[in-house]
Image: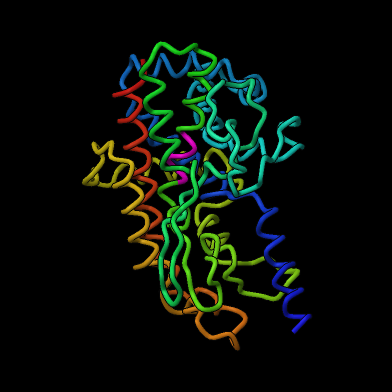
Amino acid sequence: MKQRILAVVVMLSLVASQPAFAWFNGGHEIVAYIAYQRLNPATRARVDGLLKLNPMYARWTVDVENSRKPLFAFMMAATWPDCIKQASCEPGYTSDGGNTPPGQPTDDQNIGYADKLMHQYWHFVDTPYSAGASGQPPKTPNALTEIAKLSAAIATDESDDIKSYDVVWLEHLVGDIHQPLHATSRFTIDHPQGDAGGNLVFFCNLPCTDELHAYWDGLFGDTPTQEQISENATALLRHPKPAGTESLDVQAWVTGSFDFAKSAVYIAPISQDNDPSVKLSPRPNAPYRSQANRVANEQVILAGYRLANLLNTKLK
């Protein structure tokens, strides 16, 4: 029993210390690429100027042709909120409570790049999926509350420094919330406190960390080339414009992702997670991956269109 308790403690500590990524860089850059093509000229010019205020702009655009710098910066900006979790990328940021809001006034502050908190808890909203155990309401602030807050902020006369920060976060969070496992936590007998958006659904024994959340994050690759991003995003833009692209109802976005979590993520061969004798989940098979790819494509297209519509509508 002591060994099992220790194993659970170690597992939970690993998850608590892991950054909550979504789509990895590939997915976020595809969302941004799609959105940039849908920005109207005035919004695009405004965004181009705001992104120059990001402290990493020079690094993003070094050796990039002048004509490609605006698009490239917009794509890189979509990855910045994940980047600041890594000292090798952007030092000086503090993890204030990890994936759990510490309950401080700074949790949802909006002060621009002077804010050196990682705000890891902004990246998701744990809508409870009760599949064997009673769920718990999501903690706040979260992706839902922050998208709403930052969307309102960019429509005001706030300073450009803060507005730049808000646009970068919105780029990222709109992508995040369209990853189904960033919109839910499944509550089961094996994980009565929730599975942290699939982070606790392991496919192999520790110290291996191959798990369900990372599987979905990686569907578009971690560090694809810009040629691959352009090719994939261009192909997705050829798809018919999906329904719901004009919606600015963030709760509806969350609900859509949550529904996909139930219908396309937590399905066979993924473990139902209600048998304590079953420690690991079977890995996704070919039919599962085929459906996962279809859902992921639909979601990044929606995210791109919705991000563009949000900025076209709100950005002042």
Q: Which residue lies most toward the bottom here?
A: 277
Scheme of image coloration: rainbow
Residue 196: image location, x then y, percent: 55, 60
Residue ID at (61%, 74%): 203
Q: Image check: 237 left or right of 3?
A: left
Quarter of the image for the C terminus: give it: top left
Residue 18: image location, x then y, percent: 67, 53
Position of residue 69 relative to residue 192, above or below, is above
Q: Image check: 37 left or right of 105?
A: left
Magenta segment, principal secondary structure? helix
Magenta range: 171-176
Asked if the magenta segment contains residue 202, the reply would be no
Quadrant in which residue 244 is drawn? top left
Quarter of the image for the N terminus: give it: bottom right
Position of residue 180 relative to residue 308, above or below, is below
Residue 298: image location, x then y, percent: 34, 52
Q: How many marks?
A: 0
Quadrant in which residue 25 is drawn? top right
Position of residue 221 relative to residue 48, above or below, is below
Residue ID at (41%, 42%): 144
Residue ID at (29%, 24%): 313
Q: Image check: 208 left or right of 29?
A: right
Residue ID at (44%, 65%): 135
Quadrant in which residue 161 is drawn? top right
Residue 307: image location, x then y, percent: 37, 34
